[in-house]
Image (tube, grey):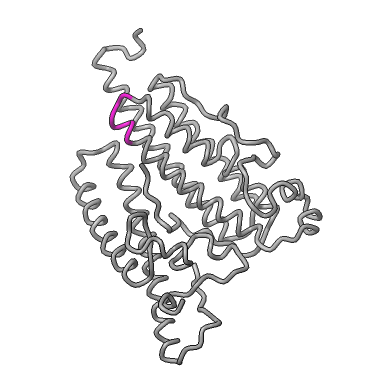
């Protein structure tokens, strides 16, 4: 997944660096969220048929905490992620990661540009 | 109800645009053994599943199949990105282009529309759960065929992940079938009528 920078905005090099940092942070967070989702989905299905497995339950709880922490971090720094989450309407304005970002000619909006538009 | 998260369950990366592979991949989008058919089958069966564990499993697996449908859709869209009409005609996929441009539709690679006839439901928990196991195994087989039909390592990676998930679903459904039979065994014979 790649988040390209906003090419038509004029900004100093410090701002550019900040934006690059933000971009790598957001890429990392969305990847970590994906990993946490893998673990959670797998544990969830396993617990459906083995709901009394204590160790699996414990792992599920640990992964849920981790997932919620990542989600909070992502939504704070990078934009809306989930239904009922903060600032969901901003997705309609082009902010945040979308699975179909790379599928169109139009460049996706970069992180950290939300105050300028 | 469902909650949408704007993140794919697994990366849908491609190395290069490959419209012919896109046309084959549509088997998993709107084909008889595709993700849509699987999701609809499980989410329909859950309304008639008495065993609570099995019912919960149907909801969870059906929901994950919808996430897979999204991965397949994004992959197909990326494989079709930037294809011009005459290119599509040269590659032999113009029949899709003429109706849907570079978008997607619920059809199989031969062009037959998706139909609810693909779904299986008779209301008998053993019959339904057994057909779910078979549906997962068929989907796994289709993924194996698709992996052997492409040389793009990134597409293969995505397809391998999806194939593994089908195996996990099949394993869970087998356990659910065991649970259903065990519960019915309190009546001594679960085929007793």
Residue at figure coordinates x 42%, y 34% from the top left: B43
Residue at figure coordinates x 39%, y 84% from the top left: A18
Q: Main secondary structure of the magenta part?
A: helix
Q: Is residue B10 above or below residue B105?
A: below
Q: Position of residue B46 (x, y in %)?
A: 38, 30
Q: Position of residue B88 (x, y in %)?
A: 76, 55
Left or right of B24 in this view: B193? left
Residue at figure coordinates x 23%, y 58% from the top left: A65
Q: Who is closer to the viewer here, B113 or B64?
A: B113
Quarter of the image for residue B117 reads top right
Q: Is residue B14 above or below residue B171?
A: below
Q: Who is closer to the viewer here, B79 or B104?
A: B104
Q: Position of residue A51 (x, y in %)?
A: 23, 39
Quarter of the image for residue A113 reads bottom left
Q: Quadrant of the N terminus of chain B?
A: top left
Any magenta on residue B51? yes
Q: Quadrant of the C terminus of chain B?
A: top left
- Residue range in magenta is B50-56
Q: Is residue B129 above or below residue B10?
A: above
Left or right of B188 in this view: B14? right
Farthest residue in the front direction?
A: A117
Q: Position of residue B146 (x, y in %)?
A: 61, 47
Left or right of B112 in this view: A54? left
Q: Is residue B40 above or below residue A89?
A: above
Any magenta on residue B16? no
């Amino acid at each position: 997944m790649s988040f390209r920078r906003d090419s038509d905005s004029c900004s100093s090099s410090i701002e550019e660096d900040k934006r690059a940092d933000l971009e790598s942070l957001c890429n990392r967070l969305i990847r970590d969220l994906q990993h946490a989702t893998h673990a959670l989905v797998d544990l969830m299905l396993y617990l459906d048929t083995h709901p009394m497995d204590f160790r699996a339950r414990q792992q599920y709880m640990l992964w849920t905490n981790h997932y919620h922490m990542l989600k909070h971090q992502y939504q704070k720094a990078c934009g809306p992620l989930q239904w009922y989450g903060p600032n969901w309407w901003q997705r309609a304005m082009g902010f945040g990661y979308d699975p179909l970002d790379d599928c169109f000619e139009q460049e996706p909006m970069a992180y950290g540009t939300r105050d300028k538009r | 109800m469902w909650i949408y998260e704007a993140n794919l369950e697994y990366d849908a990366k491609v190395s290069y645009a490959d419209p012919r592979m896109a046309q084959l991949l549509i088997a998993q989008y709107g084909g008889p053994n595709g993700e849509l058919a699987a999701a609809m089958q499980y989410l329909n069966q859950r309304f008639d599943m008495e065993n609570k564990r099995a019912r919960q499993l149907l909801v969870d697996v059906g929901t994950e199949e919808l996430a897979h449908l999204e991965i397949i859709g994004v992959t197909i869209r990326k494989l079709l990105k930037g294809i011009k009409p005459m290119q599509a005609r040269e590659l032999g996929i113009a029949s899709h282009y003429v109706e849907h441009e570079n978008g997607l539709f619920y059809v199989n690679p031969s062009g037959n529309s998706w139909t609810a006839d693909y779904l299986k439901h008779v209301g008998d928990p053993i019959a339904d759960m057994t057909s779910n196991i078979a549906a997962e195994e068929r989907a796994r087989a289709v993924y194996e065929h698709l992996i052997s039909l492409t040389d793009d390592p990134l597409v293969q990676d995505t397809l391998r992940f999806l194939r593994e998930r089908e195996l996990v679903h099949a394993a869970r459904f087998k356990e659910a079938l065991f649970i259903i039979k065990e519960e019915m065994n309190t009546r001594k014979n679960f085929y007793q009528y």
